[in-house]
Amino acid sequence: MCKLGENTRDILFFSAVVSLWIAACIFAISLLSSMDNASDERRLFHAAEDGRIQMTYESPDTDVVSGSYVHAYVYASVYASQNKEDRNNDESHSIKIDGLDVEDATIDPNFSYVIKYERGPAGSLQQISFWKESNSP
């Protein structure tokens, strides 16, 4: 039987570790290449789709929130509308509270409100209505 010296064993062990590390690097590069190819295929697939199809944000028809939330939302919306240069025209929508415009409505933070989202034919948000739970249509 042939006995290997300690240095020989160490060199064989080191070469096995280096070989495994190189194999792992090659595998990682092949995975990245596959992901890049899949991304290109997906882009080409979606480019061939009908341009009239648009993705829209889907949300539930109704939610129940507190009056404090309604107040904060209206305040943030009014503040954002005053800084129109920061907003896109696509983001504009009207807000109604109990069927009234924001300027004419009173928000009671002690009540819960039901949110109703109204969307246009293309699925874009047209109006958000907040109704007191007791007054909900």
Image: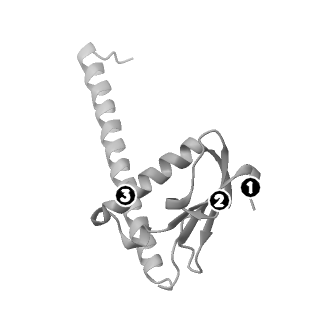
Q: Quadrant of residue 68?
A: top right
Give the foreground label among 2 and 3.
2
Question: Which numbered marker is on residue 126?
Answer: none
Task: Say which of 63 and 99 sits in front.
Answer: 99
Q: Residues within 10 Å of mark 3 (few under 14, many from 20)?
A: some
User: What's the CA distance linking mark 3 and mark 1?
Assistant: 28 Å
Going by the image, does 93 lie left or right of 40?
A: right
Looking at this view, name the residue that lies furthest to the front. Answer: 104
Kindly identify the amino acid type of the residue bearing the numbered disc 3: Ala
Give the foreground label among 3 and 1.
1
Q: Position of residue 93 (x, y in %)?
A: 49, 68
> Dividing the image into 4 quarters, which one contains the C terminus?
bottom right
Element type at mark 3: helix
* Lower position in the chain sequence, tag 3 or tag 1: 3
Q: Position of residue 126 (x, y in %)?
A: 54, 71
- Residue underneath mark 3: 80
Q: Residues within 10 Å of mark 1 (few under 14, many from 20)?
A: few
- Residue underneath mark 2: 98
Task: Say which of 66 and 91 sits in front.
Answer: 66
* Lower position in the chain sequence, tag 2 or tag 1: 2
Element type at mark 2: loop
Q: Position of residue 118 (x, y in %)?
A: 61, 69
Q: Residues within 10 Å of mark 2 (few under 14, many from 20)?
A: some
- Residue underneath mark 1: 135
Kindly identify the amino acid type of the residue bearing the numbered disc 1: Asn
> Dividing the image into 4 quarters, which one contains the N terminus?
top left
Relative height, residue 112 to residue 121 (above, below):
above
Whether label 2 touches label 1, CB < 8 Å? yes
Task: Say which of 91 and 35 sits in front.
Answer: 91
Kindly identify the amino acid type of the residue bearing the numbered disc 2: Asp
Task: Say which of 20 and 101 sits in front.
Answer: 101
